[in-house]
Image (cartoon, grey):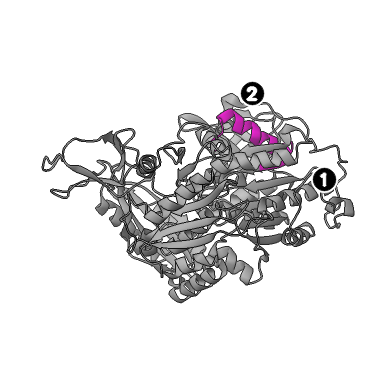
Amino acid sequence: MSCLIVRVALDQPIPILFDYGCAISPAPQLGQLVYVPFGRRNLVGLVCELAEQSDIPTERLRMIEAVWADAPALSAQWLALAAFAADYYQRSLGEVALASLPSALRNAKRWQRLAIPASPVLLSGESSQELAAGSRPTAEAQALPTGEKTLTSEQTNVLLALNTARGFSPFLLHGVTGSGKTEVYLRMIADLLTRAPLAQVLVLVPEINLTPQFEAAFRARFSAGPAQAIVTLHSGLAEGVRARHWLAAHTGQARIVLGTRLAVLASLPSLALIVVDEEHDVAYKQQEGLRYSARDLAIWRAKQLGIPIVLGSATPSLESWRQAAQGRYTHLTMQRRAHAEAVLPSVRLINMTQTTPAPIAGLSAPLIHAIRERLARQEQSLIFLNRRGYAPVLACDACGWIAGCVRCSAYTVLHKLERVLRCHHCGWQAPIMRACPDCGNLDLAPLGRGTQRVEETLAELLPSARILRIDADSTRRKGSAQALLEDVHAGVADILVGTQMVAKGHDFKRVTLVGVLNTDVALFSHDFRASERLFAQLMQVSGRAGRTGQGEVLLQTRYPQHPLYEALTRHDYAGFAATLLAERQQARLPPFVYQALLRAEARTLEAAQAFLMQGITLFKGLPGAEYVICYDPVPMVVVKVMHVHRAQLLLESASRSALQSTLRAWQPYLRTLKVKGIVRWSVEVDPLDI
């Protein structure tokens, strides 16, 4: 008697499906989770194929032990999405499919305790009769709901274009900070759910700390529906909560799913619209494990399903900007702020080579004076410095010693409040020493400044001011970031000192002044994307000023004539993007070419580079290698982390398909390499950090 053969994807780096026999009745379906033996342990796997025969003899086949039959199977469309991501990012199907599931679902012992949501619900009491896919919105569907904000003419025009979109329709919504992009998202979603109450919407935001205010806005707008209709998905959720939210989306009970990059791989059987807010943000690119771009996968998913996708940003990525320029995306713009009294803030450059008196801990006299004026008017100021801690390094003036990490090739950061030196790469920390370990000098001094030092200096200069610091150190405890942000909104703070955590997305209605410190270092970075990121960051943080009135931005620099700063003072993203694209095209850099990295980690740098050199030898014999440039291996910028040395080599091609096919053919040979001391290696497609 023949045995049903079930081919299962497991979270393993081997790019194959594993054959198992099955005697369970009813037999598992495609897309169901199963519990199977693997080696000396048991794992949760995903059923990807059913067959009647196997290359493995029947007597050697191991049997499936359990099937999670309570939950609906993952759809063929979702399996196709996982397969595409695995193929494009050069990983096994199991590494993509299983890793994208909440950890509770990957634990078979918890299956019985996971409550499967009941049948789908509606957001409101509207009829569940959906409109035909190609129908036009009715006049009632287009009518503006009562109690909502009055739209500007730009918002109205944008909504008209969005609400009439059918099929795969990628939109680039270029709206300046404060132009009301969130309101546009809310109106578009409301229109869709009026026409199709059973539809699902995916809204992506770049960072966890942005989800509370988005969730509050969505729940306030769609309060007529049940609470289960809106769920969040991000890594900050407790294991059980994330699993329940994922299941609500998977069963169709959740109408709106709001999440960070991991939500792009959520199972949404009735997905009808995708919104990617701050689409330019590098946080959408996963930097560990499966190094995928959530924005790019969202675009592919929209095309797969034939649905609209909106990419919103005040500073679009150059990749999206070029797509819009070539007509592949519909380009929509909102160049005025939504609030009737709000205008874009004025940007003034403070030349740090000419300021008198001398700056105090990096704070110039004009900036301090501007902060005092806001205090007198009971307005809020935001001081932006994208460097946490007290000072970047602790050094000895006598011999030149600098405090470094014992596990990494990096300096430790001085954290004065905790009285520790901490490595921001591996987390190692040690108490601040009293004397230089090399020469015994007692006069150790901090070099540079971080948010803690700026906070301390402001407290000394302005003792009556209420100062809040928001960075990764002050928000370590769960819920602390949201609590601090609520204090800012409530007016508890006069001065907010923060890193990139406060630079984007937040609607600080009382902030009228933004001061920007220490950004010049990015002007001379080895990273060709540094200027693009800096401009976006400065535009975003500038946008926190004057959300409901007139705002001012004071930017301290030693290079006030730099074209980047000049474009910033004009709020001229289009001109700056055109300049960058011309430079990239001339230099043959993305988005005009496609890149991948082969990284190696080993006990010594020599071993890592030896692995890469052997990889180059194998690469040269591959078919199609002549269309791909393979550069020599180099140490990574931070060459050692946690006692592991790291090196990489860059591959580049004008043809995406040529690069992909070459990588696909290369990896089986790389798996055969045996280099003493090698720890691990990986391939990253479309890297953002080189």
Could you classify mark 2 by the number of other residues whose Cα lies within 10 Å: few (under 14), some (14-19), or many (20 or more)?
few
State the image quarter where residue 74 is shown.
top right
Nearer the observer, 661 or 56: 661
Marking on residue 395: none
Image depth: mark 1 or mark 2 in front? 1
Q: Is residue 65 left or right of residue 189?
A: left
Res. 112 mark: 2
Q: Specify the farthest residue to the bottom.
A: 586
- Please state the horizontal and vertical placement of residue 588, each as a whole percent of the image: 45, 73
Front position in the image: 122 or 681: 122
Q: Amino acid at mark 1?
A: Thr
Residue placed most toward the observer, 404 or 220: 220
> Which image quarter is the C terminus in?
bottom left
Give the magenta-colored segment's residue range: 235-257
Residue 146, labelled with which disc?
1
**Is 243 situated above or below 279?**
above
Amino acid type assigned to the residue bearing label 2 in the image: Gln
